[in-house]
Amino acid sequence: MRNKNSIGADDSVGPYGRKQEDTTMDLREITDFNAPELDVYARLTENQLVNRADPANALFIAESPLVIGRALDAGCVPVSFLMERKHVEGKAAELLARCPADIPVYAAPLEVLEQLTGFKLTRGMLCAMRRPKLPTVEQVCAGARRVAVLENVMNPTNIGAIFRSAAALNMDAVLLSTQGSDPLYRRAVRVSMGTVFQVPWTYFPEDAAWPEGGMALLRRLGFQTAAMALRDDSLSIDDPRLLAEDKLAVVLGTEGDGLAAATIAHCDYTVRIPMAHGVDSLNVAAASAVAFYQLGLMSGGAPT
């Protein structure tokens, strides 16, 4: 059932941007969980959202006001909103005022929305958005001094946590091998707290075979490479040679097996994090935070 409302808004500035003077909202009340309008939120798989057969219509889902606001800040284009009815004139008002008036806003009672898996984690609000066109590695690395390289990191929770650490600890960009998890996967976006929209990122091109082609591309861009791996010849992460590098790529491997031997062989340095009590490794997300702090922030970058 559709119900178009006009809502007024003052010109005050809130945490998600400036309100418009007069906004007409395409508000559509939803009372049935099986309504087709909810398919994109409730029934399409991540692969269906990616829509590789028709990339121009590929989507991702942003959850929570904070994450949606950061996606809008990055220029992502909304397709529709879904929220609890009470939020329309409440905490969603400033976000909605930033969007075109013809964007459908699906509003439903809590008992309908609670049928969505994980709805309580969304803080009552979701937004379907068009997937942005990814930049090239050269564009992402322009002006960068510290970049994170993720080899086949498969867990979306780890991807989100790594992006959050990269944003907090002064990494300038994130590059991913093509076999890794998608940073716009719903859980990755949620765990990142929307920092996937703040840190420039992209995949290595498919014609740059990993690791040889990807490493060669990084070298052409002036980067030295540091593999995070336990080897007899590993440098401690606080080694002055690492801190002295003007442009450094920190290479992290997949969960469990870590970096492939071929990848380590193509890197300029092999680096370890000193650990106590017989612990020989950290989860890749935890290791990334330590590495980014030491090699990003402590290398001379200033907090922003």
Image (cartoon, grey):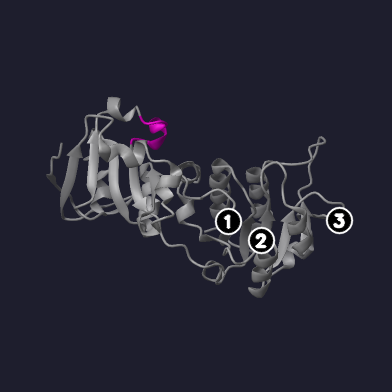
Q: Earlier in the sequence, mark 3 or mark 1?
A: 1
Q: Which residue is mark 3?
A: 233
Residue 178 has which mark?
A: 1
Figure quadrant of the N terminus: top left
Quadrant of the image occupied by residue 242: bottom right
Residue 210 has which mark?
A: 2
Residue 88, x across and y down, in percent: 23, 40
Q: Is residue 302 magenta?
A: no
Q: Is residue 117 magenta?
A: yes
Q: Mark 2 packing: few (<14 Cα in 10 Å), some, or many (20+)?
A: some
Q: Is residue 250 left or right of residue 196?
A: right
Check contact, mark 3 vs mark 1: CB within 8 A: no
Q: Residue furthest top?
A: 111
Quadrant of the image occupied by residue 246: bottom right
Residue 84, x across and y down, in percent: 27, 34
SS under mark 3: loop
